[in-house]
Image (spheres, coloured by chain):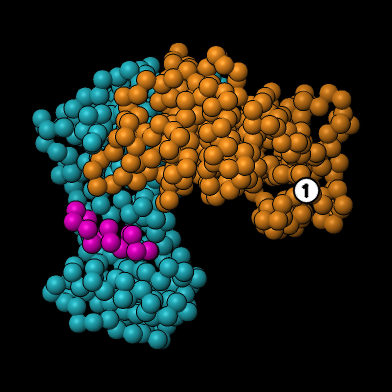
Chain colours: A cyan, B orange
Amino acid sequence: MAGPLLLDDADDPRLAPYRAMRERDLVGRQGRFIVEGEVTLRLLFSRGARFRAESVLLAPERWPGLEPFLRGIDRDDALPVYLAGKDVMSAVTGFPIHRGVLAVGLRGGDPEPDALIPPAPAPALILGLVGLTNHDNVGGLFRNAAAFGADAVLLDSACCDPLYRKAIRVSAGAALTVPFARTGSGAALLDLAERHALTPFALTPGGGEALETLQPPARALLLLGTEGPGLPEVVMERARRVRIAMAPGFDSLNVATAGAIALHRLAGDRLART
Amino acid sequence: MAGPLLLDDADDPRLAPYRAMRERDLVGRQGRFIVEGEVTLRLLFSRGARFRAESVLLAPERWPGLEPFLRGIDRDDALPVYLAGKDVMSAVTGFPIHRGVLAVGLRGGDPEPDALIPPAPAPALILGLVGLTNHDNVGGLFRNAAAFGADAVLLDSACCDPLYRKAIRVSAGAALTVPFARTGSGAALLDLAERHALTPFALTPGGGEALETLQPPARALLLLGTEGPGLPEVVMERARRVRIAMAPGFDSLNVATAGAIALHRLAGDRLART
């Protein structure tokens, strides 16, 4: 990188992708997304991350700490790094910027769901989300998918965007590293399971099979729906319905938490036990 | 109950405990707390809930649906029920009220931690929280404690208040039903464990014992600390350090999620598997 550029005008056109962040999050960003914070920035550039960065915007006092890292990942001098005071950053983004670390990522093309599933007979653990519209839950599930080594997350068309700013943050950056793709409907997830020899599990409080005693298969698809209505019957009837053992009278878990417990179980011997 | 009272003046003194909710949450409420929403309201009055309500405030259109329930739990006509339009409710509370269901609860005296632990040799599962200052995490942990049948939650003095409005909401009301008490320091939790023959487990990514293979004892204390610094060494050195198996390279779980996985494991055969 040639060196960072100090920008002191909030109207500088190079800062346009950072403008009015909250509003733009709601209407979409033409193939861009926003990354906040140092941990997430480092994940955006980590090996395995699928996205490219368009630019980085730092408060000047963050530059010395991040310079070695940014020079290391940008050996061909292609990444613009802008510096701007937190007052300028806040004026551009429309809300108070505390940590002084932002970047714009480029979504690139959406991968095909089939391409993300490890070919049989290799082990595979895929998370399938149906109708999840809460960014905290989707972000949390990406974090859990990363923690338990899921190969990919597949989302039906009703799910919210994992690259929404808050979802990335709650995912602890895992939305940038765990491969994901969209399927059309929930039923398409079951078709994928059939094509790829994945055993589909529908997590539901009324499941006839106990998660605690099932023998995790080498290739599994874990399906999760919303906390209220749950998975649609058309999805559940084609899957093994499993439940998490709970205390009588309070059968209520957050969907990301329930997903973590099920992923942990289904990952089984795949996890590091060092 | 004599019947609900329609109040149309935001300055009515009977509405004082509902005033300026957000600000009051920050400075405390002299023994009161606020409950929002129908599900939580019902839990406030459920068998096993330890708190009394001082009053209920409903949007008029919520009264018909809740009347049978409220008459059923208030057979001695002691509970004031106020009705006010959502505009009045919003003016009193200081933010937009959508669901139109609020109540003021009375904290009462704090129980002694010792009193909440089932006497040996009965089974016991106690959750001990050290330094958790995030209301989402504390609320989520109460929800998980309820789901997995923990007998009580003990919090050191650094933990935030489980009866803060947001913590109650995230707990899905479990903060009103799972018994809890304050201990002074984290070390006091270990003293309690000794006095009550509870096996203390410290959940930590660096734990030498795998959660997946341990045999849950009949009486356990699960200790959780903050995501960053974790549990203090003075606590961990007196406990069995356990870790959750995770994928290499991403050993990061939300503390409430990690707690759910550990509670689910430690509850073992106590959970309904019907």
Q: Which residues are magenta?
A: A36-49
Residue at left 27%, top 81%? A4
Residue A67 position within the rendered picture, expressed as x and y whole percent measured from the top left: 26, 74
Taking the image as shown, residue B102 lies to the left or right of residue B175, namely right
Residue A173 position within the rendered picture, expressed as x and y whole percent measured from the top left: 33, 54
Residue at left 68%, top 31%? B112
- Check residue A179 for magenta coloring: no
Task: Name above or below for residue A245 compared with residue A33.
Answer: above
Residue at left 19%, top 82%? A2
Name the foreground residue: B31 vs B224: B224
What residue sits right under mark 1 in the picture? B30
Q: Quadrant of residue A249?
A: top right
Taking the image as shown, residue B187 lies to the left or right of residue B202, namely right
Residue at left 22%, top 29%? A269
Name the foreground residue: B215 vs B40: B215
Question: How many numbered marks does the figure carry?
Answer: 1
Q: Quadrant of residue A39?
A: bottom left
Determine the secondary structure under disc 1: loop
Taking the image as shown, residue A26 lies to the left or right of residue A162, namely right
The chain carrying label 1 is: B
For disc 1, the neighbor class at 10 Å (few under 14, some 14 to 19, many from 20) is few
Residue B205 position within the rendered picture, expressed as x and y whole percent measured from the top left: 34, 41
Amino acid identity at mark 1: Gln
- Residue A74 makes an appearance in the image: yes
